[in-house]
Amino acid sequence: MLSDFFAFLNDNLLKMVWLQDLVNKLLLDVFKIDQTTYFYSSLSFFLFDIIKIFILLSVLIYISSYIQARFTPERTRQILSRFKGVTGNIFGALLGTITPFCSCSSIPIFIGFTQAGLPVGVTFSFLISSPLVDLASVIMLATFFGWNVALIYVFVGLIIAVIGGTLIDKFHMEKYVEGFVVAPNNSKLDDIAIEEHIPSRKERHIFATQQLKDIIKRVWIYILIGVAIGATIHGYIPQDFIEKVLGDRNPFSVLLATLVGVPMYADIFGTLPIAEALISKGVGIGTVLAFMMAVTALSLPSIILLRRVVKPKLLGMFIAIVVVGIIITGYLFNIFGYLL
């Protein structure tokens, strides 16, 4: 049956059940580790997640970067310049999902957009969605939590990005952008001729390979840290304690997860192992997603960088919109989690 075929592909290509079996066999038969110990549970989690994440990350980053090769910052600016108002915010958020920029690398893109004369609301929609949602993270989310959670996460991320950019535009917050960032002499992108260049297959391969190297180089340490934390939670921290702090019995669990996540600097690949371990300990999906969103959409380094190009009032509004959106999302996910 077709459903059985897709289930087979899902188990072997995404969930990598074969890899889990291989890791368990290695620990049991080769290293003779007692599977009833906390150490076995943590080590199995660590080895499986490390190998799985790097395999998936390598394949997905290469494929998505190959597809994204045409979406350079210059071309993205050119596309966004065609849309105004809420439509512009929607396209800004959508383009953010298919461009491979993290929260810190999105800041120079934000400067380029603003200097090109794009509305500040559109640039903030892009700034919110770009680190929060991308093609590779969607598939990784589906691997860990299923397609329902992955697609709803994408939808919620886009909603936050669109609402955030729209509010910033409606309140005319462009006056709080630092003067050196504003487009010189009121120039607009429409007046700037951008030469269209369609990359060849070889150029796309070179771009994808370079993106893969750059991203792996940038995130490998956060993945190791994330998996190590996840393995510790999975193997050593009692479920009762986790549920008491972040479970449904604590009405402030979503708020706490969001506040803990904001100062951290990592991308979704580093937070997934922690999220997986928390889910296994009974933490609500909304609390876990709130933590992941806070880490990826907001980070202390990106906030510091953004402060250099916008004034405190606009920075505060940006942070408030994202934090409130994440908290509301977290509680809604927890309330309706049974539907997933």
Image: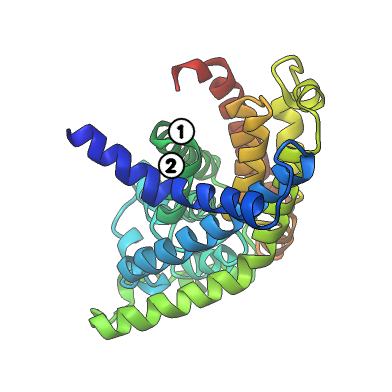
Q: Position of residue 209 (x, y in %)?
A: 42, 78
Say which residue label 1 marks: 149
**How many other residues sit within 10 Å of disc 2, few (<14), some (14-19) or many (≥20)?**
some
Location of the N terminus (image quadrant): top left
Q: Is residue 223 above or below residue 152?
A: below
Q: Contact (CB < 8 A) between labels 2 and 1?
A: yes
Q: Which element is circle 1 on?
A: helix
Of the 4 image quadrants, the one containing the C terminus is top left
At x 38%, y 57%, the residue is: 98
Pick the residue in front: 61 or 14. Answer: 14
Residue at image x 39%, y 79%?
207
Residue 75 location, x and y as percent? Answer: 34, 70
Question: Residue 335's image quarter?
Answer: top right
**Residue at image mark 2:** 142
The residue located at (58%, 20%) in the rendering is: 334
Q: Amino acid at mark 1?
A: Val
Estimate the spatial distance between the alpha carbons at disc 2 and disc 1, rounded to whole Å: 7 Å
Q: Is residue 185 visible?
A: yes
